[in-house]
Image (spheres, helix red, strand yellow):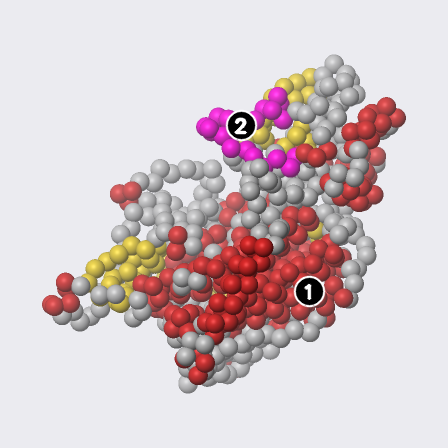
Amino acid sequence: MSRPREHPRAVVPYRYSLGDKLYLPLLVGLWVTLKHFVRNLWTRGSQVTIQYPEQRRDYSHRYRGQHILTSRPDGSLRCVACFLCATACPADCIRIEAGEQPDVNIEKYPVVYEIDLLRCVFCGYCVDACPEEAIIMSNNYDMAFFDREQSIVAIEDLQRPFVLDPSRLGYRPSYPEEEAKRAEIRQGLFDLVEEAKHRQGGSGSGARAASV
Amino acid sequence: MPTVTATPPLLERYPEGSILPQEGLDQPAWVVRREILEDLARDLRDHPETRFDLLLDLCGVDFPERSERFEAVYHLFSVTRKERLRLKVPVSEAEPVLPSLVDVWKGANWFEREAFDLFGLRFEGHPNLRRILTHEGFQGHPLRKDYDPARRWVLTEDKVYRPRPQQPVEEEDEDLFERMTINIGPSHPAMHGTLRVVATLDGETIDASEVEIGYLHRCFEKMSETHTWQQVIPYTDRLNYCSSFINNVAYCRTVEQMLGIEAPPRAVWARTILSEFSRIMDHCVCNGSVLVDAGALTNFWYLFQPREEIYGLLEACSGARLTVAYGRIGGLAADLPPDFEDRCRRLLETIPPFLDDVDALVAHNRIFLDRSVGVAAISGEEAVNWGWTGPCLRASGVGYDVRKAYPYDLYDTVEWEMPVFQGGDVYDRYRVRMAEARQSLAIIRQLLDSGMPEGPVMVEDPHVALPSKEAAYTQMESMIYHFKLIMDGIQVPAGECYSMVEGANGELGFYIVSDGSGKPYRVKVRPPCFPIFSTFSRLIRGGTVSDAIVTLGGLNVIAGELDR
């Protein structure tokens, strides 16, 4: 049986036009580069490079950077050592050891909470899993180490005070009504620290106090 | 999805019971005895009523409790008739031998090596059956169910396979002075990641070459089996990392099909737009690398700028630039940012000038034309036989695009053209990608004009989607669902499914088998660049080393997807 032949068996390569043969389109190319050269030379802000680290790219308020363990107003960790973040983690980078809390409403707290930043894939699943908003992410992407031991960060590196610096926050649970506000905060139009202080005094639910 | 339901007359030629048709969720499947496999494959390829000219994928599945423990699963596709068929060939553990189909579909070569490597299936008649993804010193077959995922090997240099590209038959004595074998890669900036080619040169011409891959193998498929369904998504990001969002969509769509759910309209709309932006990004990276490999560095910079801007959009949506992990089974991880539409429209204005600049620089530039026209040309028929899909196939004159043939998401609601060129060479691969990037912009523009659908971005099924944080904090029922979903994961009904999307370099398929538990039983990616790169030795034969470098750039081989 002969093989059905529907697909082209031969190739038809591009045919050079006369202009192509005479290298004429090179002049168009020269015009393009010249245009860019002149524009970059004379127009401020048309350059696309940035002077890192003095100048940094502005990331959104969802940026998934280094983790933050949030605190209660009294300074203790919000974490109740429920292990949901460690379970949800696809990279197995979270290690928790639980201890008993005297407060019966809380029951547990983490004695050890370590994240191996070299294993972490910064997917944000721990933030999604946390039922206490105890772990959120910052927009910090400077995480260079001198040796591997330093890549394992513990509570003292992760814990941040109750009032968080809003300009450093990244991925955290999203509430539709807060989305627009967060975008404003990113642009520096909102005095967020004041807001957090206000909430600390007034809010009774507590669950969302750290979620500014 | 269209399927082959009628039994073609050729079936009558085979003994009773050697072919058992099965109904599939996605496409029909035949359980085939291995004795007839080779004849059947040839018939399926050549018979005018079947014409399965493209072998999409071949993989093994391990069922330790069955008497015939392994199953080799072939996914066939007829480009001419737009039909699909799955062949399942059971083999026993004592004699895991199948006939090699390299003579029927050349693309089977690497797929068979992969099944040998990962499952220990042996293919009789295969020209070079040895490990492909794992190291030569690796012992055992990692995707078998009794292989412990936590097992570690110390792999040493002395076990490394030393490729010896076959010498051409005739070898005259005076040529010996000029013939030499060189290593290109794996650590070489022109080899785009971790690819290695060992080439025998006669002067500057490549006589023979052998390709080594697997340097970036990280057992994606085994890792998937030890994670919950939702946890696999960050792993899919790392397949084709130039357009990671498309991988998310491909995986999520497959699992959604198995669950029988559909993402809400807003999520589908966003998926389509972000997939197209990812495609533009991928094409820009590929064309940028082709041009920088050809010595046109300026274009690399011009083409990487759109990518930078698209990364900004993806970051605003997902929180990460490269590994977005933005898709979720049932929708998206988070709602779109408030300024999503504005940002998209800004991108639609900023991207075309860069594409125009690059076209003005090189599209008719004789220096580039001389480097690319006619280089590594392959005809459409041969490309199909090698298992090619995507822009590279369309550059060879075969118009197959999943978005046209099987419109998914919103592709049937927009007007766009599928660019097809006839040259089959590096230059036409460049042209196809440039044209496709412009078509993607047209698709995005129409979707933006049609308006953003309102509503949620996740299905409202508590067995699939995590409850909102507010609900989880305030309602006991939601809290229980939250814990159940994190601890046990989504429960996907038992079954199998193959589903595909048009990835940036071809048909990106996921073949998933579920046993009804909270973790995938088997996840097989159909990586589009795997069969394409298996052709590489054939493409560069007779060319120069510099041609080989430009060819590699034009194929858009992404090591993350190739090696998995």
Q: Is residue B471 rendered to the left or right of residue A88?
A: right
**In the figure, residue B537 lies in which quadrant?**
bottom left
Q: Would residue B248 be seen by someone viewing this image from the given angle?
A: no
* Residue at image mark 2: A152
Q: Chain of mark 1?
A: B
Residue found at x 83% / y 43%: A177
Q: Which residue is mark 1?
A: B444
Query: Which three-letter amino acid code belongs to the residue tagged 1?
Result: Ile
- Position of residue B169 relative to residue B93, above or below, is below
Q: Quadrant of the N terminus of chain A?
A: bottom left
Is residue A112 shown in magenta?
no
Q: Position of residue A193 (x, y in %)?
A: 78, 29
Q: Nearer the viewer, residue B266 or B477?
A: B266
Amino acid carrying label 2: it is Ile
Q: Residue at x 81, y 29 (%)?
A: A194
Locate residue B98: give its quadrant.
bottom left
Disc 2 residue crowd, few under 14, some 14–19, many 20+, Cα 10 Å? some
Residue at the image position 13 percent from the left and 70 percent from the top: B172
